[in-house]
Amino acid sequence: MVVTAKQLRLQTSKILRKVQQLGSLTVTLRGKPVARISALSQEKGGRLLDDPAVGMWEDRKDMKDVHAWLRKIRTPRYLR
């Protein structure tokens, strides 16, 4: 299925329901394909820890204490 960017903007929930039914669709902008939207798998038992993105920064020493790192990056520059 192919939808335009305008259709996606105006009918998002309807189009997302179609994605669940069909599996995927292509979004076009000015007649050219720019994106593909695909449904997430409905497998049960999938664990978050199995995701390849989990733990990708575990070897960084500056992020051992996540809360301290977040406080540091959220501090305005003039207060550092």
Image (cartoon, rainbow, N blue to C red):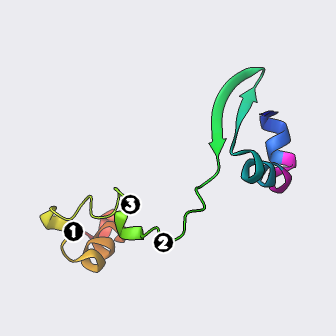
Where does residue 73 sit, x and y in percent of width and height? 32, 66
At 21% across and 77% down in the image, what residue appears?
A: 65
Q: Residue furthest front?
A: 44
Q: Earlier in the sequence, mark 2 or mark 1?
A: 2
Neighbour tally class for label 3: few under 14, some 14-19, many 20 plus, Cα within 10 Å: few
Front residue of this view, candidates 77 and 64: 64
Where does residue 67 sit, x and y in percent of width and height? 30, 79
Secondary structure type for disc 2: loop
Mark pair 2, 1: CA separation: 30 Å
- How many numbered marks appear? 3
Q: What kind of secondary structure does the magenta stretch mostly adopt?
A: helix
Write down the residue under mark 1. 63
Q: Nearer the viewer, mark 2 or mark 1?
A: 2
Identify the image quadrant of the C terminus: bottom left
Query: Is there any visible trace of residue 76 in the rendered image?
Result: no
Q: Earlier in the sequence, mark 2 or mark 3?
A: 2
Query: Is there any visible trace of residue 28 in the rendered image?
Result: yes
Which region of the structure is painted magenta?
A: 10-14
At 54% across and 69% down in the image, what residue appears?
A: 44
Q: Identify the amino acid type marked 3.
A: Asp
- Left or right: residue 25 versus residue 52 is right
Q: Quadrant of residue 6?
A: top right
Write down the residue under mark 2. 45
Secondary structure type for disc 3: loop
Q: Nearer the viewer, mark 1 or mark 3?
A: 3
Write down the residue under mark 3. 51
Q: Residue furthest top?
A: 31
Q: Identify the amino acid type marked 2.
A: Gly
Neighbour tally class for label 2: few under 14, some 14-19, many 20 plus, Cα within 10 Å: few
Identify the image quadrant of the N terminus: top right
Q: Quadrant of residue 77?
A: bottom left
